[in-house]
Amino acid sequence: MITLSVHAVGLSAPGLPSWAEGAAVLRGERPYVPEALSPFAPSLLPPNERRRATASVRQAFRAGEEAIAGRDASTLATVFTSSDGDLSILHRICTALTTDERVVSPTDFHNSVHNAAAGYWGIATGSRAPSTTLAGFDGSFALGLLEAGMQIVSERHPVLLVAFDVPAPQPMQQARTHDSIASCALWLLPEGVPAAADATRLQLEPTDEPETTLADAALEAGRRGNAALRALPLLQMLARQQAARVVLPASGGQQLAVRLVR
């Protein structure tokens, strides 16, 4: 079993534009209305990098910037997790390769790697701390949380976990459906550090139980509509601050159980 603490949260999805607003919805204090997100420009990025940043990178920053809330993140290890990365970039590259000229945009090539968001984050924060980027289909968030937890207990350093996914263009959308753009971020701490004294404690352990679903039909549709929002049962538990347990989809026939302990 892995035990860690949640220091801060970021959230961005239709109808859940920030952690403060999203937490109120997840507590049932206001109805969930999946309104489109407003445009976002990462404030941490220098102008040149901001212009080159893709929709998926901007979405990752949207939750990540909220989680750090202007605090120094230069020494903060990161785990970025995305089911698909930026399929719009891959679509443009594949389309370019079908033409006679086969000219691929250098910016698209630069942004095509799965760890593009992590690279931009390193530039933005000046971080030389360890950074991991992974993918695990619908289990991407849980696998990212497990990776962050393993780093926390083995290396005893804080970790920022950022999960993000954006819809793919056609025809890729037929094969990998994401209904919306979404991201969430957790600033996680090891037990025993001063900042963790008043933080919410979580315990992680593998299980083969079915994944937790949401009672609200609209929120459940949102959870199923984006791989990053498979985190919603955990975020709802954090918003309510009640001792509880949820099961998140992972991979290989295993799930990840997360318990909030007081």
Image: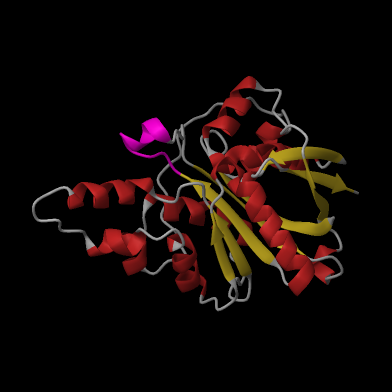
Name the residue rendered at 57%, 31% in the picture.
224
Magenta highlight on residue 169: yes
Q: How many marks?
A: 0
x%, y% of residue 225? 52, 32
Residues in magenta?
Answer: 166-175
Task: Locate residue 210 relative to residue 244 in the image: left or right.
Answer: left
Report whether 144 appears left or right of 154: left
Residue 93 in percent (x, y) is at: 25, 52
At 21% from the left edge and 46% from the top edge, which residue is drawn? 95
Query: Which residue is farthest left?
Result: 100
- The single residue placed furthest to the top in the displayed view is 217
Which quadrant would residue 104 be assigned to in this image? bottom left
**Residue 108 placement (x, y as % from top left):** 28, 58
Which residue is farthest right? 262
**Between residues 25 and 229, which one lies in front from this camera angle?**
229
- Please tell me in which quadrant of the rendered image residue 234 appears: top right
Residue at position x 21%, y 60% in the image: 105
Among all residues in the image, which is located at the extreme front? 252
Is residue 187 at all visible to an observer of this figure?
no
Nearer to the camera, 168 or 232: 168
Magenta stretch prevailing secondary structure: loop
Viewer can see residue 112: yes
Question: Vertically, is 29 above or below 95?
Answer: above
Counting from the top left corner in percent of width and height, residue 18 is at 58, 45
- In the rendered image, which quarter contains the N terminus? bottom right
Q: Would residue 186 be counted in the magenta stretch?
A: no
